[in-house]
Each structure stands twice: as C-alpha cells, then as structure tokens.
C-alpha cells in the first residue's frame, strides 16, 4: 500500500542523508514491487509531470501539442519506467558476472535510491538558462551515488567495482537510448542516464563508440584471415617462437590495461562528485575492459599476424600436449612443445 510519508522520507533521506538511508533500506530487504510502490513509481510520476509543467510554462509548447504535450509526457513516463527496469536488470545481472550478487530486488532498490538526485534535477530541465545546469549537476550526483551504493547492495568486490560499473553503465546507456528512440522520446534520458546524455556528447561518443568501432573492425578483419595448414600437420619452431612472443606481449598489454583500471578505481573511490573529465575517464575505462578482452587478437593483428594461423598453432600444441603420441605429427609437435613448455605454460 502506498505510504506518502514513507516516500517523502526516502526521497529526503536519499538526497540529504544517503548512507544512512541506504543502510536502513537494505536492512528492510524489500521486493522490487515494494520499492516501486514506495519510491520508484511516485518519484518518476511526479518528476515527469512537474518537468512537463515547467517546460510548458517556460516555453511556447502547446499543452496538447506533440512535443511537450500530454502525449509526449506519457511517452516520457513510459521511457522512464522502462529505463529504470532495464538499468536495474543490467546492473544486477552483471554483478553476478563480476563475482557479486545477481539480485534484482536489491539492484532495483540501488538504482532507484541512487536516481533520486537525477529525478529531482529532471524537474528543472525546462527552466531557461540554468535548468540544464541544475539537471546536469544532480544527474552527475546520481552517478556518484550509484557508484557508491553498488558494493553494499550487490556485493561487487572492490577489484571488480570499476569494471562492473563501467560495463553496466555503458550497456544501460545504449539499451535506454534504443528504447527512447523506439518510443519517440530520444531527447529524454531517464534517471542516472540523464547526466551522461548532457555531457560533452562529441567527446564521449567519439571516445566510446570510436573505441568500440575499432574493436569491431579488428574482429571483423581477423575473422577474414585464412590459413591453409600444412598437409603433415606439423608446426615449425619459428611459428612457436612467434606464438610465444605474441603471448608475452598479450600478458604485458593485459597487465597495463588492468593497472589503468586499478588506478581509475583509486581515483573514483573517494570522489564527492563527477565532472566532464570523469565521464571521459569512465569511457576510457570501458574501452580498457574491451581491449583487455581482445588483447591477444589485438597483439596479433597490430603486429601484422594472421589470426587463423595463430589459432591453428595453439590448437595443434594443445592437442599435442594432451595426446602426445597418437601419430607422427602429434609426436613431432609434442617434442617442440616440451622444448618450450615453460614459456607455453597455461596455453
């Protein structure tokens, strides 16, 4: 049952005394339905309606027109509700992937509580001159809250905190953007996503999507590589030496990317607020995650290597290490494997 006093208490506490409010609400262990009734639903409804009224008052929009009117407001409302459910699912699902807890009830509570500043800020979006700045500032505060609340609600380990946050945030941003386009409210970004959409879009999008595009092109090009294995099935010593060189470079590259993420984690841990440069850092961090996942391919391709040949060599050595002597080719490959076993450890 809806309790107005409970809702107001959560909003006030979530904004002015966040840590205590988060701890208290976590102890209540509410279902997502309870959270939606007590906080999320009323917060979104009031935010969208007040935002529409202020926009109408300070603009030339018709109350019954297409943009800024009742129909558009309803689409905003639907987009906001769908968006917060998507964000909750993604953050909770990926928490399990990053060794935290995949708990949708807690994920929904975490996203809803952290979005309080963003939805308050969204109310003032329609104010001339200063509205966007208020909305941006409170939206960024919502991102800070979200970063801080995740470890306690979804139990994401400290060493996975930044990676989980970046991956979840970017995935949510893309998903919400698609939903908004489908609903025809592309200009409206719900909740914590509000701050991302109003940052320096050119630098963020070029950094994020430029990095993703580069990775996609590399994967596509690697997939086109062709290699005709020798008829005798034997690898050469030069091939093994090249393989070891690429594996060592891959290990070094992954280590450097992991160190970047650790440094980013240290920088973000105690921050009181986010700036435009911080959004850029998070974007860079996401690209580091993607680069780390594709590090071996990147090393091979940037060195002018053939990805299909690289994979074939690894497969032959794995087979040789397992089978050892089932035929002449395997015996030969196993002898070479033993010669370089220390350097091929974990192949």
Image (tube, rainbow, N blue to C red):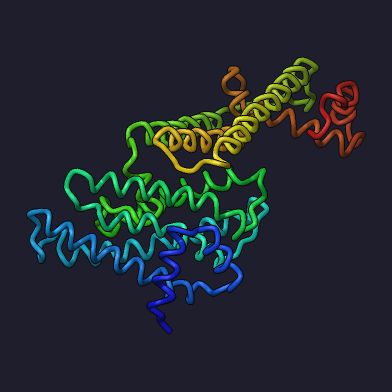
Task: Decide if residue 314 is on the left or right side of residue 126.
Answer: right
Q: Is residue 228 visible?
A: no
Q: Can residue 263 be seen in this view?
A: yes
* Image quarter (top left, top right, bottom left or bottom right) of the N terminus: bottom left
From the top left corner, tell me how far across and down residue 44 is, in percent: 34, 66
Give the image quarter of residue 267: top right
For the residue pair 237 and 116, the one nearer the viewer reads as 116
Which residue is at the far bottom? 1
At 88% from the left edge and 38% from the top edge, which residue is drawn? 323
* Image quarter (top left, top right, bottom left or bottom right) of the C terminus: top right
At 74% from the left edge and 26% from the top edge, which residue is drawn? 231
Task: Decide if residue 44 is on the left or right side of residue 345.
Answer: left
For the residue pair 84 and 37, the one nearer the viewer reads as 37
From the top left corner, tell me how far across and down residue 87 is, in percent: 46, 57
Give the image quarter of residue 324: top right
Which residue is at the far front? 16
From the top left corner, tell me how far across and down residue 172 is, in percent: 45, 52
For the residue pair 286 and 262, the one nearer the viewer reads as 262
């Amino acid at each position: 049952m809806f309790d107005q006093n409970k809702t107001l208490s959560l909003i006030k506490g979530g904004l002015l005394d966040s840590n205590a409010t988060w701890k208290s609400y976590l102890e209540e262990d509410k279902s997502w339905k309870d959270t939606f009734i007590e906080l999320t639903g009323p917060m979104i409804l009031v935010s969208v309606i007040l935002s529409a009224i202020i926009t109408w008052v300070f603009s030339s929009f018709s109350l019954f027109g297409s943009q800024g009117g009742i129909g558009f407001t309803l689409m905003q409302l639907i987009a906001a509700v769908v968006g917060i459910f998507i964000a909750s699912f993604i953050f909770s699902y990926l928490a399990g992937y990053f060794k935290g807890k995949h708990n949708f009830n807690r994920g929904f509570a975490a996203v809803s509580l952290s979005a309080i500043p963003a939805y308050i800020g969204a109310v003032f979006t329609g104010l001339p001159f200063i509205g966007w700045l208020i909305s941006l500032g409170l939206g960024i505060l919502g991102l800070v809250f979200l970063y801080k609340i995740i470890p306690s609600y979804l139990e994401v380990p400290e060493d996975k905190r930044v990676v989980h946050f970046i991956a979840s945030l970017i995935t949510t941003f893309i998903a919400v953007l698609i939903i908004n386009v489908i609903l025809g409210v592309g200009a409206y970004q719900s909740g914590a996503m509000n701050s991302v959409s109003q940052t320096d879009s050119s630098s963020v999008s070029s950094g994020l999507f430029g990095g993703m595009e580069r990775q996609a092109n590399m994967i596509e090009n690697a997939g086109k590589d062709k290699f005709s294995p020798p008829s005798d099935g034997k690898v050469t010593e030069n091939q093994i030496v090249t393989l070891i060189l690429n594996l060592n470079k891959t290990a070094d590259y992954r280590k450097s990317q992991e160190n970047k993420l650790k440094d980013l984690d240290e920088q973000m841990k105690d921050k009181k607020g986010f700036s435009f440069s911080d959004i850029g850092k998070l974007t860079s961090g996401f690209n580091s995650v993607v680069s780390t996942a594709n590090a071996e391919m990147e090393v091979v391709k940037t060195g002018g290597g053939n990805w299909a040949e690289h994979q074939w060599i690894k497969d032959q050595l794995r087979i040789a290490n397992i089978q050892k002597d089932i035929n002449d080719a395997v015996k030969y490959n196993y002898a070479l494997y033993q010669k370089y076993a220390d350097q091929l450890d974990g192949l």
